[in-house]
């Protein structure tokens, strides 16, 4: 049975795309900060101390030189050199100052695509419910995805499988569970706690961040297992480490635009962009020792120095327009939307939880795997509109349009169509956009049909030029994994 959703107002196509592509992924930020270490004049011992604390391994100078000259097959440097995608999982956790130190408050999957010179960042909501298989037995543990990292370090479940134990066990457990959701196989992970984030901003002398609206949160967690109010005004302001952390973590803002997972992810990315700008200035490089001290005890990763440098070298000149920011949740005040919804999917009534419309995650895999649209296809600049012929699934046209807003497609506002059992791509261009029509057919299914402004009769508000995708009942079923 389809779950009806209230219709949401459309956003400006320009504003949405600009907001979602101007931010720099957290993985690149972390690597930029490490690159500060690489490029700065620091002693070998200082860098070795950092790498030992962050990775658990001493720096191997000979090995790093060899990797720089001829990287081993399967390494990040090798993949980037040979045009292969690289996936990095970024995790932000509370740390020892928090009552739940290993819960990952921020989960970001980053894919680097060297063939098209683009980067995708997908924020995974912490409240997403998954069926975890992290134990050596056949038991399945139902919980929120943010709990995967803490499995090796607590006694929340028994019989943890051997591959998820040890110093990197939390990262590997998170990679496994996020991989099931996204369909990605991760090359490396980076986990940073709140203290490292806060101290990093302070080491840089603060950062400048702009808010689109006020942010008032009366239930922000303090450091004593309680809550305190926080208030920030709209506009640009200079933030210290604690203030930047408050803006990044806030989940219960009064303002709808700030309270959603979408808004929270956007704020985190704006802060990361500010950190990147500050860290890569001349003054930022001069503060490399302070940055090392801020990060050393509160960052953990299985990356090598050559991994970090390879990503930095690849992405240091990447324009902001090459970064694709996608979301599984809606940009409005509601917590659900796009590919997730709110209902009880295993955690019990009254518990905040997000549940996939497709429990197999197949639609999410397909979406994330298709986000890097060929530049030649995008170069056609075909006008595209999604219209909903699946009348039993209200709002599907808005969800699909919101999903593909940051992809580079030229999208019009969606509308509702007459009922249609099958998905159809109406081509009003006389075949002018063959690559785009083929891509739409591959993703949505159905057939491409030549159309005129009067035949078939258009729906109210439907465009009669370019390409129109009539989402049929068949696509709605695939959306739900049925």
Image: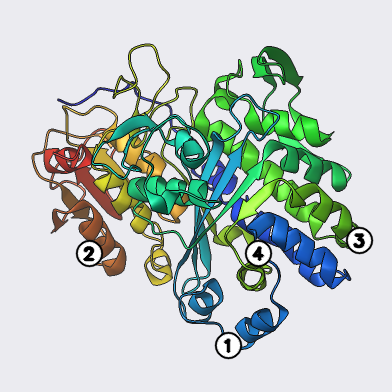
Q: Position of residue 112 (x, y in %)?
A: 51, 64
Is the residue marked by circle 1 packed among few (<14), some (14-19), or many (20+) residues within 10 Å? few
Q: Nearer the viewer, mark 3 or mark 4?
A: 4
Q: Position of residue 481 (x, y in %)?
A: 18, 40
Q: Are marks 2 and 3 in contact (CB under 8 Å)?
A: no
Which type of secondary structure does the marked residue at label 3 adopt?
helix
Q: Nearer the viewer, mark 4 or mark 2?
A: 4
**The quadrant where residue 476 appears:** top left
- Mark nearer the N terminus (1 vs 4): 4
Distance of label 4 from label 2 (alpha carbons): 61 Å
Distance of label 2 from label 3 (alpha carbons): 59 Å
Q: Nearer the viewer, mark 2 or mark 1?
A: 1
- Mark nearer the N terminus (3 vs 1): 1
Residue 430's disc number:
2
Which type of secondary structure does the marked residue at label 2 adopt?
loop
Q: Nearer the viewer, mark 1 or mark 4?
A: 4
Residue 70's disc number:
1
Q: Residue at left 35%, top 43%?
A: 134
């Amino acid at each position: 049975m389809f779950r009806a959703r209230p219709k949401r107002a459309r956003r400006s196509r320009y504003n949405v795309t600009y907001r979602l592509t101007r931010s720099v992924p957290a993985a690149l930020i972390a690597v930029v900060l490490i690159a500060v270490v690489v490029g700065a004049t620091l002693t070998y011992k200082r860098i070795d101390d950092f790498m030992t604390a962050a990775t658990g391994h001493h720096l191997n100078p000979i090995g790093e030189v060899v990797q720089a000259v001829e990287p081993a097959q399967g390494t990040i440097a090798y993949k980037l050199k040979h045009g292969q995608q690289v996936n990095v999982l970024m995790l932000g956790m509370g740390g020892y100052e928090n009552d739940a130190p290993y819960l990952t408050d921020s989960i970001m999957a980053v894919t680097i695509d060297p063939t098209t010179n683009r980067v995708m960042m997908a924020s995974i909501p912490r409240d997403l419910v998954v069926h975890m298989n992290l134990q050596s037995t056949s038991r399945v543990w139902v919980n929120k995805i943010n709990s995967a990292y803490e499995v090796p370090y607590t006694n929340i479940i028994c019989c943890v499988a051997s591959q998820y134990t040890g110093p990197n066990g939390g990262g590997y457990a998170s990679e496994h569970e996020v991989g099931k959701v996204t369909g990605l196989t991760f090359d490396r992970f980076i986990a940073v706690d709140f203290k490292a984030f806060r101290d990093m901003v302070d080491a840089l002398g603060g950062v400048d961040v702009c808010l689109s609206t006020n942010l008032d949160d009366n239930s922000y967690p303090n450091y004593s297992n309680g809550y305190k109010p926080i208030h920030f005004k709209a506009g640009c302001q200079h933030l210290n480490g604690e203030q930047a952390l408050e803006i990044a973590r806030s989940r219960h803002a009064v303002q709808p635009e700030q309270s959603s997972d979408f808004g929270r992810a956007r704020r985190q990315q704006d802060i990361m962009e500010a950190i990147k700008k500050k860290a890569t200035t001349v003054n930022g490089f001069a503060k490399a020792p302070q940055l090392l001290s801020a990060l050393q005890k509160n960052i953990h990763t299985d990356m090598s120095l050559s991994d970090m440098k390879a990503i930095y070298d690849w992405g240091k000149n990447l324009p902001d327009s090459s970064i694709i920011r996608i979301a599984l949740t809606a940009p409005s005040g509601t917590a659900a939307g796009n590919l997730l919804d709110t209902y009880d999917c295993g955690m019990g009534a009254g518990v905040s939880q997000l549940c996939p419309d497709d429990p197999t995650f197949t639609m999410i895999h397909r979406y994330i795997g298709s986000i890097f649209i060929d530049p030649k296809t995008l170069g056609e600049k075909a006008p595209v509109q999604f219209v909903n012929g699946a009348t039993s699934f209200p709002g599907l046209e808005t969800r699909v349009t919101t999903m593909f807003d940051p992809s580079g497609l030229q999208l019009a506002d969606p509308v509702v169509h007459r009922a249609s059992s099958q998905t159809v791509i109406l081509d009003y261009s006389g075949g002018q956009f063959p690559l785009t029509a083929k891509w739409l057919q591959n993703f949505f299914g159905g057939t491409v049909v030549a159309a005129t402004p009067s035949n078939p009769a258009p729906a109210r508000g439907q465009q009669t030029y370019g390409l129109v995708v009539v989402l049929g009942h068949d696509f709605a079923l695939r959306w739900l994994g049925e």
